[in-house]
């Protein structure tokens, strides 16, 4: 399972915050909720997404934008319109002087705005994604990206517009899955664009040799992989695989495997019921000690400390730069007992 698929497995949308926003100009909403990811699409009318840094993006019907937190931004009818409402963490909505607007601007089922017949209708879905695997993908995104509906036609958006205002049994699950599908469609379309600067591992998934090797590592990280074993599975020599993998991904196969295993381990450690030994087995380490040694060396804190930091919810545990796919990761040390099975 690659990082794009893993985005929707585990920390995928479950009870995600979805809202239909109906506004009549002039209007502007300041978003300071620190949500890791927000998907916005115009169903009717126009709007501007104005980041604090970078250029404003104009959205027309069918267009979609993704804002990557925690940086704040403003959504408005015009970039010059001053905010009248602030969205804060915990789905709090209020004016500049603290007046609660949650009920004042409620217009029905999952619908909010300043006019029930407003000329602009926007569909919004907010994710709370904290996982390491998700981070490998989302860190490769710009703070704000947009796709033009004229060149990217997605049948999911009208469907989402119809479903978001329904109040039926199982509706929350329906909306979560629609939001998942919309997000994955946007990301696939975005990474296919030349300006996207997709991470090396993502581009390499299209290579017939390296793509297969990546999927083998991602789908079965607990297997005692070696370069020789991967080469046999992909039908090339060890040297050819090592050269091609490193050139496309930016790091050798076993170094990538180490990073993938530790990212999976970090996500599994967020479950307080999972023991370190169980996590170690699932990600390919021979013992809890082996995983602890590798994890501490890579991240600068023990699995126990990482779990405590993650579960307390005060801040995101540190993730090494290599997890973003933009920097090479050193291979396992010669004394790493957890990587013995991963050596060639």
Image (cartoon, rainbow, N blue to C red):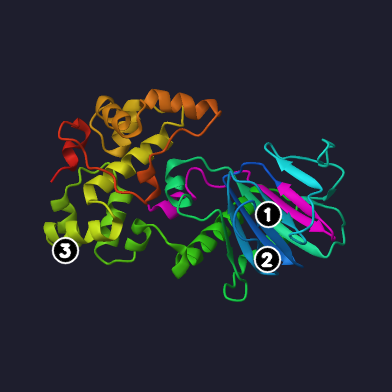
Q: Which residue is mark 1?
A: 124
Q: Is residue 70 magenta?
A: no
Q: Is residue 17 magenta?
A: yes
Depth check, mark 2 against mark 3: the one in front is 2
Q: Which mark is residue 58?
A: 2
Q: Residues within 10 Å of mark 2 (few under 14, many from 20)?
A: many
Q: Which residue is mark 3?
A: 235
Instruction: Tell me the element at label 2.
Output: strand
Marks 1/2 in contact by CB < 8 Å: the verdict is: no
Q: Find residue 4 and report its horizontal and vertical position in percent.
A: 44, 55
Camera-side residue of 191 and 221:
191
Mark 2 vs mark 3, CA separation in Å: 48 Å
Residue numbers of the magenta segment: 1-30
Q: Which mark is residue 68?
A: none
Marks 2/3 in contact by CB < 8 Å: the verdict is: no
Q: Residues within 10 Å of mark 1 (few under 14, many from 20)?
A: many
Is residue 273 visible from the viewing direction of this image? no
Q: Find residue 83 and report its horizontal and vertical position in percent.
A: 78, 50
Of label 1 and label 2, which has the lower sequence position?
2
């Amino acid at each position: 399972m690659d990082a794009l698929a893993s985005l929707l497995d585990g920390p995928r949308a479950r009870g995600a915050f979805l809202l239909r926003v109906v506004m009549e100009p002039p209007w502007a909403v300041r978003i300071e909720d620190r949500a890791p990811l927000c998907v916005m699409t115009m169903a009717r009318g126009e709007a501007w997404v104005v980041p604090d840094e970078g250029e404003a993006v104009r959205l027309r019907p069918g267009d979609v934008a993704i804002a990557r937190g925690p940086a704040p931004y403003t959504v408005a009818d015009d970039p010059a319109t001053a905010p009248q409402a602030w969205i804060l963490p915990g789905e709090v909505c209020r004016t500049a002087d603290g007046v609660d607007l949650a009920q004042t601007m409620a217009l029905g089922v999952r619908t909010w705005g300043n006019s029930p017949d407003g000329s602009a209708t926007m569909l919004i879905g907010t994710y709370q994604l904290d996982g390491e695997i998700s981070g490998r993908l989302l860190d490769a995104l710009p703070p704000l990206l947009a796709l033009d509906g004229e060149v990217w036609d997605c049948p999911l958006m009208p469907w989402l517009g119809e479903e978001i205002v329904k109040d039926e049994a199982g509706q929350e699950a329906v909306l979560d899955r629609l939001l998942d599908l919309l997000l994955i469609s946007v990301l696939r379309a975005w990474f296919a664009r030349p300006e996207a600067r997709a991470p090396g591992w993502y581009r390499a998934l299209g290579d017939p040799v390296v793509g297969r090797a990546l999927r083998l590592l991602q789908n079965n990280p607990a297997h005692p992989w070696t370069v020789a074993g991967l080469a046999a599975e992909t039908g090339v020599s060890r040297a050819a695989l090592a050269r091609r993998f490193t050139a496309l991904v930016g790091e050798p196969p076993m170094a990538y495997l180490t990073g993938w295993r530790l990212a999976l381990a970090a996500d599994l450690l967020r479950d307080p019921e999972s023991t370190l030994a169980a996590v170690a087995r699932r990600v390919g380490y021979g013992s809890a000690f082996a995983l602890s040694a590798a994890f501490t060396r890579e991240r600068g804190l023990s699995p126990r400390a990482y779990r405590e930091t993650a579960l307390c919810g005060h801040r995101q545990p540190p993730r090494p730069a290599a997890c973003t796919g933009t920097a090479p990761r050193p291979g396992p040390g010669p004394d790493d007992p957890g990587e013995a099975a991963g050596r060639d």
